[in-house]
Image (cartoon, rainbow, N blue to C red):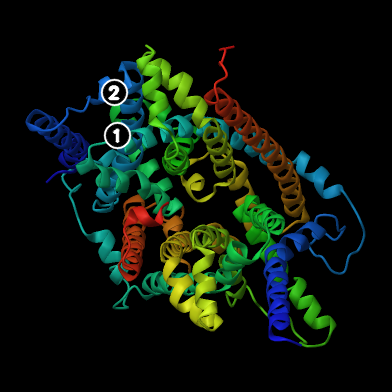
Amino acid sequence: MSAACARRWLIRFYLVLFFAWLFGPLAVMGVTAFNTSAYPQAIPFEGFTLDWFAALARDRDLVYGLENSLRIGVFVVLVSVPVGLAGALVMQQIHARARSLYYLVVVSPVLTPGVIIGISTVIFWRDLATAAGARFLYDGVVLTVLGQSSFISAWCMLIFLSRLQRFDRAIEEAALDLGAGRTRVFFDILLPFLRPAVLSASVLAFLSSFENYNTTTFAILADKTLTTVLAGRTRSGATPAISALAVTIIAVTVAGAAVYEVLKRRETAREAAGKRAAVRTEAGEVLVPS
Amino acid sequence: MKPALGHQIILFLPVAVVAVFWLSSIVERRRGGGPRKPGFVARNGPVIATYLVVAVALWAVVMIVLPQLFMVELSFRPKLPPARVGDPDDVYTLENYRYFLFGSTTSTASWNSVHINAFISTIVISILITIFDLVICYPLAFYMAHVARPARLRMLLLLLIAPYWVNELLRAFAFRIIFATSGLINRALMAIGAVAEPIDFLGRDIGLYAGLSYAYLLLMIFPLYNTIENLERAQIEAARDLGAPWWRIHRDIVLPFARPGIASGCTLVFMLTAGALAAPLVLGGPRSLWFTPIVYDRFYQAFNWPQGAAYAFILLLACIAIVLAVLRLFRLSLGEITR
């Protein structure tokens, strides 16, 4: 066997090993969700059942936690995407001397352990709510949204920054020369350009919020989310219902990822069409505003 | 100094910093030679300027800086029942840090060895896990960036992202199913007669280490892949044409080029591993000591918030120290690794 051939087999072997490591545990867990055995086990497979999924739907805490997680996820998107966008725009305009300090401050939540973000959020808002006499602020859902948004906004900002690098300032100048106001330029030029980034940032923000545990477990106080209920279940004893939940989540996220992929493809196609149109205009055709 | 005054100083601090930068920029513009740049409000219009300032101020000051400062402040205060906060004995103290080092005043041991050991082993094991992840991810990242064809690459990327959307707790739970005493590995070993008694993988923390090195693989792969992808293929081919063996190509060309990616992958993985809470909760044996569950227990078992804040701050300092050390080691700036 030649050396090149041997190397190819080595790479193949490594790839198989790597993905076995990546998917093996999930596959094993998936099998246990359908096994009748009361302890989550893959072998021996005692019989096929869907009872563990039914047990999920009956679990009141879990259903409540799920609703709360969805609610928090939506709020986190509503906070993080606009804040991340503002963060990115300020980053481009801030005075050079302040830029490195500003960058350090707003990127630090990405490099801070989630538990610490949760802890500090709870401590701060407890003191502030007490001092201001506004006890309603000291609420699990509010604190979780604030805690999660502090680092999810930073991720969103990084997404916006990378998209903004490709923004052509000349378009903005042209609109201004044609008499558009600053606010109008923002909504009619900048935002449409950033649309793909807004989409990516929203999906990322929602999913990071939904699966977050470290920050949430502190910030949620006495309330519950899906992940905190789940943590309690996995600690108190293993049942195949947890595997069933995992299978459900995997199914939903795979479906979600597919939808996201389709949306993104459509966006890319739209952009390509836009570019073709722009090229045609440059070539001398008259662009009639629709 | 009384804690009430401490709070006022903390609340005033960010305002002062912003004011200093703002004033310095005004002074500079007054003096400034060259073409005059439009001011912030003129450049964005009043509506958008207000949105930018309000959003960033809320985020940077109220959501990031103040909570951290309040946590550090609390860590220097004694544990008191709510009614006695503000009493004469509510003064700044190092008691919580003393406890981390020397333990309870009534104990006979000279060091708080349980907590110190947990802290040191968390840091050391996180470093080892980070290195392990780097080693197993590097070949794949290189393969994706320079060997795989586009169709294969798209499939690999999708396959890599898919498990990452499964909750951290559930990924840990999967490892529990595999490594438990009546789990997959023990049943398989006993079925083929390799062992008579099940091996306690979880009690020996083997399950925990496996789960932790699995948990954040993705955050190593992507930074590596992103930087290696930017390497001109011509450089590798030139080296190959000049007769360089494959290991020298990697040592002298690819690895130095991938420095920012390696640094950013390593800092992310280290930070997430050292701060992991889900895996230690689900996979930790009765005697396993990871530092984050200890911090958690300070809050919700001991109900000693100031001490919990002190422990969280110690963990934060360790993470900052490691990030700075990595930046030093790779001679990079923070901006280069968070791209």
Q: Position of residue A45 (x, y in %)?
A: 89, 65
Q: Percent from the top left, x then y, of residue B145?
A: 58, 62
Residue position for label 1 = A93
- Residue at 60%, 34% (x, y): give it: A68
Q: Residue furthest left?
A: B31
Q: Is B51 placed left or right of B218 in the picture?
A: left
The residue lying at 63 percent from left, 29 percent from top is A273
Q: Which mark is residue A102?
A: none
Spot the residue most to the right.
A47
Task: Name the spot of residue B16 as percent of width and height, x first.
Answer: 16, 36
Structural crowding at the residue carrying mark 1, measured as other residues with C-alpha within 10 Å and reported as few (<14), some (14–19) or many (≥20): few
Against B273, residue B308 (above or below) is above
Instruction: Tell me how far mark 1 sits from mark 2, CA to CA.
Output: 9 Å
The residue lying at 53 percent from left, 38 percent from top is: A201
In the picture of the structure, the residue carrying the numbered disc 2 is B43
Residue B329 at x, y percent in the picture: 33, 71
Helix, strand or loop for disc 2: helix
Q: Is residue A127 visible?
A: no
Residue drawn at the location 26% of the way across and 21% of the way down: B41
Quick one: SS at disc 1?
A: helix
Pick the residue in front: A93 or B112.
A93
- Density class for disc 2 (Cα within 10 Å; few <14, some 14-19, many ≥20) is few
Can you tell which quarter of the image residue A129 is in? top left
Callout 1 amino acid: Gln
Chain ID of residue with mark 2: B
Tell me, yes or no, if residue B139 can be seen here: yes
Q: Is there CB contact under 8 Å for labels 1 and 2?
A: yes
Residue type, mark 2 in image: Arg
Q: Badge 1 sits on which subunit? A: A
> Measured along the vertical axis of the image, is residue B40 above or below residue B222?
above
